[in-house]
Image (cartoon, helix red, strand yellow):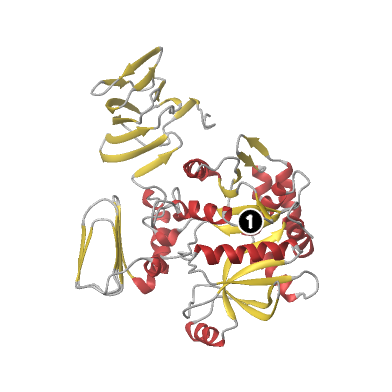
């Protein structure tokens, strides 16, 4: 039994590897929904980190977060953690997606690396709650139960007949939480209505609380192949500052499986092998799986309309309008979603917003960049915005953070003109190194090694004009790079 002098060690684990295709065009493969700011001033990922940190109590010692995410999003994660002032976080980088069971196993192996056995508090990065106090109470109860050896899942009390979630059928309750009778798949509408009326069915939140050793033991019992393959990938890991990379080839060989299928459902079907408990969560939870869910959690006018950005809504009902870069006006719409970005516009029946992923699939098959990238593309050194393009030319607006620099690079097919709009630019071009200030410019010939850096204390903004026979982002040969991207 833990005492006040020996609090329960808690390891927050944020699963940040999702793609969020159903929130296109705001969510893209290179900037998925968990990193979006949909409300307030923080992203869904940042909100998840803050919520898990809030579990701390006199008997619960919460460590810095462990984030499991896609290697391609590593600098997004790092930047958003920096904005929160989160020091000491560990970033486990998946070279390819293998679903949630291997991801959670990586976190368990990391948490056990120093001989510790903390309670893992595992949450997806793309959820939201409206009652933070109720969420904290439920998670604290789950952590205390897990410290006793239980596997705990958070079940959300349903407030409508939802067909987009899996359900948990609860058994009789006890002091540690309710027992779990079984897991059930996403139902049809009639079945969901019956579940709601029954009162003993809960939405599966995808949040799990369990000691690292208990998780590994359960995986050993039900999916030893996943555990063995993940251990092999973990043994081949490399560490680079905050980044921990499992062996690439070994990780790709791990069977792809969810936490539910790998462990939770077998545990529920094998009473006595492990103790499975559920803690009920009644905190205004939503997983924001589609634009319909965004409308549900948004502030609305008297006609049920929700709007974001520069939007004018007239004679419309139960409609969501999300504008990011220009004025959007709508007239006479009922139950419609309108989402505007600089390079794409979505108009959809709100009830069919789950089908947006079909549009993303078509874009992907056509090889179009709109499924992966926004017009404004974030990089570890800042961002660039593709303002205009045509045959043999492209214009970009580029921002470089103070103290940051692009790689030392060259291009085979394009030359570049740089014009400083604000700040100070340090330009390396061949053997020359020069400083440029506002309204000054320089020319980078085709094939010349070059680098752009910001030596100042304020952001550097430039306009870049590219010209040449091929202007793709893959026409870059990197010789040196602060962020480990050199060839």
Residue 279 drawn above or below residue 77: below
Residue lying furthest top = 431
The N terminus lies in quadrant: bottom right
Nearer-the-camera pick, 7 or 236: 7
Residue 211 location, x and y as percent?
Answer: 73, 58
Residue 392 location, x and y as percent?
Answer: 27, 34
104 to the left or right of 484 = right
Nearer-the-camera pick, 66 or 188: 66
Mark 1, residues whose alpha carbon is within 10 Å: few (<14), some, or many (≥20)?
A: few
359 to the left or right of 228 = left
Residue 278 location, x and y as percent?
Answer: 65, 72
Q: What residue is at 53 percent from the left and 79 percent from the top?
A: 187
Q: Quadrant of residue 247?
A: top right
Q: Quadrant of residue 393?
A: top left
Residue 397 drawn above or below residue 265: above
Q: What residue is at 71 percent from the left and 66 percent from the top?
A: 145
Q: What residue is at 42 percent from the left and 54 percent from the top?
A: 364
Q: What residue is at 35 percent from the left and 31 percent from the top?
A: 459
Nearer-the-camera pick, 421 or 353: 421
Residue 178 drawn above or below residue 419: below
Q: Quadrant of residue 88?
A: top right
Q: Which residue corresponds to mark 1?
A: 57
Residue 105 location, x and y as percent?
Answer: 69, 54
């Amino acid at each position: 039994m833990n005492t006040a002098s020996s609090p329960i060690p808690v390891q927050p684990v944020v699963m940040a590897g999702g793609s969020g295709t159903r929130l296109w065009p705001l969510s893209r493969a290179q900037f998925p929904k968990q990193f979006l700011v949909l409300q307030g001033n923080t992203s869904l990922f940042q909100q998840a980190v803050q919520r898990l940190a809030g579990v701390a109590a006199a008997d619960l010692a919460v460590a810095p977060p462990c984030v499991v995410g896609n290697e391609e999003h590593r600098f997004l994660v790092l930047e958003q953690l920096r904005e929160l002032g989160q020091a000491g976080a560990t970033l486990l980088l998946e070279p390819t997606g293998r679903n949630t069971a291997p991801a959670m196993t990586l976190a368990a192996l990391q948490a056990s690396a120093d001989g510790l056995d903390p309670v893992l508090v595992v949450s997806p990065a793309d959820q939201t709650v409206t009652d933070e106090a109720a969420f904290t109470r439920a998670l604290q109860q789950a952590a205390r139960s897990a410290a006793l050896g239980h596997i705990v899942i958070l079940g959300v009390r349903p407030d409508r007949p939802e067909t987009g979630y899996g359900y948990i059928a609860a058994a009789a309750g006890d002091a540690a939480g309710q027992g779990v009778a079984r897991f059930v798949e996403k139902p049809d509408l009639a079945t969901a209505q019956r579940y709601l009326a029954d009162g003993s069915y809960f939405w599966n939140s995808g949040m799990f609380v369990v000691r690292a050793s208990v998780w590994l033991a359960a995986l050993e019992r039900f999916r030893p192949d996943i555990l063995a393959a993940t251990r092999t990938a973990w043994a081949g890991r490399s560490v680079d500052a905050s980044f921990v990379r499992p062996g690439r080839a070994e990780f790709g060989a791990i069977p792809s499986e969810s936490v539910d299928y790998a462990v939770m459902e077998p545990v529920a079907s094998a009473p006595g092998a492990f103790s499975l408990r559920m803690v009920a969560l009644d905190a205004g939870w939503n997983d924001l799986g589609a634009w319909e869910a965004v409308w549900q959690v948004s502030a609305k006018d008297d006609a049920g309309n929700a709007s974001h950005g520069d939007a004018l809504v007239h004679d419309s009902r139960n409609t969501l309008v999300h504008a990011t870069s220009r004025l959007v006006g709508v007239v006479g719409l009922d139950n419609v979603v309108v989402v505007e970005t600089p390079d794409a516009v979505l108009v959809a029946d709100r009830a069919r917003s789950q089908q947006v992923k079909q549009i993303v699939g078509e874009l992907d098959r056509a090889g179009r960049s709109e499924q992966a990238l926004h017009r404004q593309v974030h990089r570890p050194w800042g961002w660039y915005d593709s303002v205009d393009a045509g045959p043999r030319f492209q214009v970009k607006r580029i921002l470089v953070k103070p103290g940051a620099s692009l790689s030392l690079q060259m291009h085979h097919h394009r030359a570049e003109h740089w014009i400083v709009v604000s700040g100070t630019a340090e330009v390396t071009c061949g053997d020359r190194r020069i400083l440029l200030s506002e309204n000054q410019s320089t020319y980078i010939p085709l094939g010349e090694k070059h680098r752009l850096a910001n030596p100042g204390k304020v952001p550097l903004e430039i306009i870049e004009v590219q010209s040449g026979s091929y202007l793709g982002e893959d026409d870059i040969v990197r010789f040196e790079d602060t962020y480990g991207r050199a060839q």
